[in-house]
Amino acid sequence: MSQPKTKVKKVVLAYSGGLDTSIILKWLQTTYNCEVVTFTADLGQGEELGPARKKAELLGVKPENIFIEDVREEFVRDYVFPMFRANAVYEGQYLLGTSIARPLIAKHLVEIARKVGADAIAHGATGKGNDQVRFELSAYALEPEIKVIAPWREWEFASRNALIAFAEQNQIPIAKDKRGEAPFSTDANLLHVSSEGKVLEDPAQETPAYVYSRTVDPESAPDEPTVVEITFEKGDPVAIDGERLSPAALLTKLNQLGHDNGIGRLDLVENRFVGMKSRGMYETPGGTILLTAHRAIESITLDRGAAHLKDELMPKYAELIYNGFWFAPERELLQTLIDKSQEFVSGRVRLKLYKGGVYETPGGTILLAARRGIESLTLDGGAAHLKDELMPRYASLIYNGF
C-alpha cells in the first residue's frame, strides 16, 4: 500500500462506530502511523452511541481522544431553522436533510482538532458522492491550513471483500449482517432519513416497503385527520398546540405527527455536485409539515416584493447548501437578507395532516399581536424598509429592460 506524501501526527476522524469508519480508523493508524481522535455526533439519528466509544477503545483510541457530543439542539437551532426561513428546496423537491448536517460535523471536527492539536481531519465519504465536497469545503472555510484525509480516495481496497479481509486481519468486529453489501445505504438525523444505492438504483423499480423507517404507509394512516397548530416568532417555530418547545423537541414532535400520518416520503433522482445522477428515497416528516406552515405564515406577513424576491433567491441558496457552501460568504450574505425578511413573520398556523398530505385549514393562519395592527393592503414598517433597501436593484432591473 502506498505511503502518504504528507506526515500526519494526529487526525480527528468523523466516527460513527460502524464497520466502514472502524476500518478507516485502523487504516489511518497503520497507513499514517498517527494518533487517531474520534468524534461521534448525536444528530438525532436514533442510534445508541455508547457502542461507538467501546469500539474506538477496542481499536486503540485513548479514552481522552474519544469525543461523543449531543448536537441535536445546535443542529436544529443553527442549521435547520435558518435553512427553513429560506424555504430551501433543492431541485424543487429535496429538503436538504443530509446536506445541512455536514457543515455542523465539519465544524466540530475542526474545533476538536484545534483543541487536541491535531494537524488533520478525516471523513468516511466515498469518492462518488457529495458529502466529500461538503466536509472538505466546510473544513477549509473554517481552517484553510488543515489537512483533510479522504480514505475512500486514497486506499487500494477494490471490493467489499478486500475491506472485510482488512477488518479480519486487524481484529475489527464484524456483525454477521455486515459481511455482504447492504441492500441500500442510509443517512439519518433529526430532520430526515435518506436511502440510496443497490435496490434503489433502478428508477423504474418501486421502492420496497422495507426501506421506509420514519413514516407509515399513507394508505394505512388514520382515516381521521390530525389538526396541529404551530406558532412562529420571527420565522422560527416555537410552539406546537400552545406548548413552547426547544428546537430539537419541536422537530421531534413534528416528526412523530408526520410519521403517524404518512407525511414526508419522497422518491427522486437528483443531480449531484460531482456530476452524477442519483436516485434517493427520503423521509422528512417534520420538515415537510414545517415547510408548509412557514410558507403559510409568510403568505400574510411578507409583502409581495419581499416574498417574490425570496422565491427568486431560494434556488441559489438551496444549491449553495447542497454543494457544501454553508460557510461561504455568499450563503451568509443571502442569510442576512432572508433573516431580515423574517422580522415580522410571527403568528399561528393551523394545519390538517391526512394520509400523506399537509393542508392549511381555512382561516387557520393568525397573526400574533406583536405583529402590530396590520390593515389589509398596508405595508408594515419592516417590509417597507426592506423594499427601500431593495429599491436600487428594482430600479436597475427596470432600467435594463427586465
Image (tube, grey):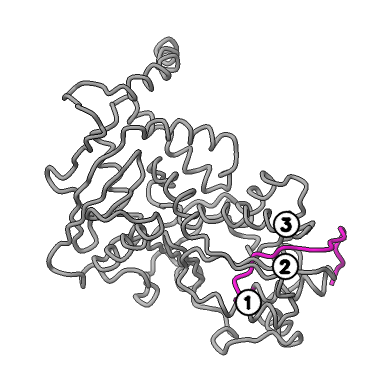
Q: Which residue is mark 3?
A: 115
**Label whose residue precedes the other's in the sequence (3 or 2):** 2
Residue 384 horizontal/vertical position (percent): 33, 20
- Mark 2 neighbour density, 10 Å: few (under 14) some (14–19) many (20 or more): many
Write the start and end of the magenta stretch as one range: 1-20
Q: Is residue 151 magenta?
A: no
**Label whose residue precedes the other's in the sequence (1 or 2):** 2
Residue 110 horizontal/vertical position (percent): 68, 54
Q: Which residue is mark 1?
A: 53
**Tag 3–tag 2 contact (CB < 8 Å):** no
Residue furthest to the top in view is 399
- Mark 3 neighbour density, 10 Å: few (under 14) some (14–19) many (20 or more): few
Q: Main secondary structure of the magenta part?
A: loop
Q: Quadrant of residue 22?
A: bottom right
**Tag 1–tag 2 contact (CB < 8 Å):** no
Quote the CA–CA distance across marks 3 and 1.
19 Å
Say the numbered circle drawn on residue 194: none
Q: Is residue 180 above or below residue 140?
A: below
Q: Quadrant of residue 353?
A: bottom left
Q: Label 3 sits on what residue type?
A: Lys
Quote the CA–CA distance across marks 1 and 2.
11 Å
Q: Which residue is mark 2?
A: 37
Q: Label 1 sits on what residue type?
A: Arg
**Label whose residue precedes the other's in the sequence (3 or 1):** 1
Q: Is residue 323 above or below residue 48?
A: above
